[in-house]
């Protein structure tokens, strides 16, 4: 079964790991790159790297991002030199950013660079950025507009978000490889990632929604998994961000955002009472355990998501 997943962040990476365990090289993951930033002259792609490290089995499982058994000597030296190190880069992680930056400066596209890095780490799935063009998420707070990582990491997601924009999105283009994978997909999955700042930028790339709509018209089901369980985000600011932007901070609130885009919506047993309201939106509601605590639960949820896709297709 050829599967395309749209993902960003730790939750998206976990489900992608489960999907890879089910379909292997038939999985393609389109990853948010609007969180990208420049640090110490290097191009850093946090969501791409979280997915890549997770699918390669190298991720730090305790924190969900970065590499396991990482060391921080380079960051320590940078700090001694007076550099700002609020966004810390581990020693082995630095190698990824050094290679990526050198290849981009050499004229390679981010899509090609990402696929080469993933292959070198033994990832069987195909990992692709949502676009090769620079897009940057910015959030408006009481202190004005902030770059996403300034809000997310430096300020620890504390400022209230009043508005979100994706700088450069109007000039972005869907990579040809992404369009091809969506066109041949037998199922499309929106991972349990923040619908505003992880899935939102992917859907905002001009032409992306048209590709998804065309796939659905051709019979390819789209299944979304809620990142909200019992009114709370398992990780990150999705719940507080939904509320401050005028959405309901619940699985139903996420389903409403995806109304008209997906065929089935997976929500946790803690939110089973919302299934009827989800169904009223015209979505097939699937209730299961969505919390992924280990490899077995990742694989189980992925299998249930794919089964929901098959059911929606019928």
Image (tube, rainbow, N blue to C red):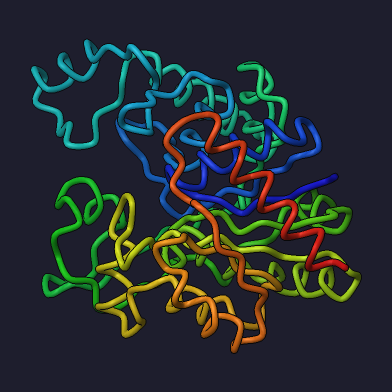
Q: Determine which quarter of the picture holds residue 167.
A: bottom left
The one nearer the camera, 245 or 292, is 292
The picture places residue 138, in percent across and down from the top left corner, at: 33, 65
The picture places residue 31, in percent across and down from the top left corner, at: 57, 48
Relative to 51, 24 lies left or right: right
The one nearer the camera, 183 or 294, is 294
Count of picture labels: 0
Q: Determine which quarter of the picture holds residue 296.
A: top right
Image point (75%, 53%), residue name: 307
Image point (77%, 75%), residue name: 213
The one nearer the camera, 69 or 255, is 255
Relative to 241, 272 lies left or right: right
The picture places residue 204, in percent across and down from the top left corner, at: 57, 70
Is residue 98 shown above or below 160? above
> Is residue 295 at least partly visible in the picture?
yes
The picture places residue 67, in percent across and down from the top left corner, at: 39, 20
The one nearer the camera, 9 or 18, is 18
Q: Quadrant of the N terminus?
A: top right
> Is residue 171 at least partly visible in the picture?
no
Q: Determine which quarter of the picture holds residue 273.
A: bottom left
Is residue 228 shown above or below 79? below
Relative to 213, 257 lies left or right: left
Q: Quadrant of the C terminus?
A: bottom right
Is residue 302 shown above or below 199? above
Image point (58%, 22%), residue name: 56
């Amino acid at each position: 079964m050829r599967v395309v997943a749209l993902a960003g962040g730790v939750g998206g990476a976990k489900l992608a790991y489960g999907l890879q365990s089910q379909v292997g090289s038939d999985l393609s993951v389109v990853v948010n790159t609007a969180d990208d930033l420049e640090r110490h002259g290097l191009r850093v792609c946090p969501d791409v790297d979280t997915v890549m490290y997770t699918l390669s089995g190298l991720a730090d499982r305790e924190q969900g991002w970065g590499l396991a058994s990482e060391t921080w000597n380079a960051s320590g030296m940078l700090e001694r030199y007076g550099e700002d190190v609020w966004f810390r880069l581990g020693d082995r992680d630095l190698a990824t950013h050094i290679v990526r930056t050198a290849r981009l400066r050499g004229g390679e596209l981010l899509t090609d660079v990402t696929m080469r890095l993933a292959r070198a780490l033994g990832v069987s799935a195909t990992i692709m950025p949502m676009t090769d063009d620079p897009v940057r998420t910015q959030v408006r707070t009481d202190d004005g507009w902030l770059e996403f990582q300034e809000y997310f990491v430096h300020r620890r997601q504390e400022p209230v978000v009043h508005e979100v924009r994706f700088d450069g999105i109007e000039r972005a283009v869907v990579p040809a490889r992404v369009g091809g994978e969506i066109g041949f997909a037998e199922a499309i999955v929106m991972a349990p990632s923040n619908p505003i700042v992880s899935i939102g930028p992917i859907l905002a790339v001009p032409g992306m929604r048209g590709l998804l709509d065309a796939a659905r018209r051709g019979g390819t089901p789209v299944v979304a998994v809620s990142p909200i369980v019992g009114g709370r985000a398992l990780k990150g600011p999705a719940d507080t961000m939904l509320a401050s932007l005028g959405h309901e901070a619940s699985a139903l609130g996420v389903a409403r955002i995806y109304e008209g885009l997906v065929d089935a919506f997976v929500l946790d047993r803690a939110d089973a009472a919302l299934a009827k309201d989800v169904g009223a939106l015209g979505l097939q509601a699937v209730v299961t355990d969505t919390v992924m605590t280990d490899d077995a639960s990742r694989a189980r949820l992925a299998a249930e998501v794919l089964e929901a896709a098959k059911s929606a297709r019928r």
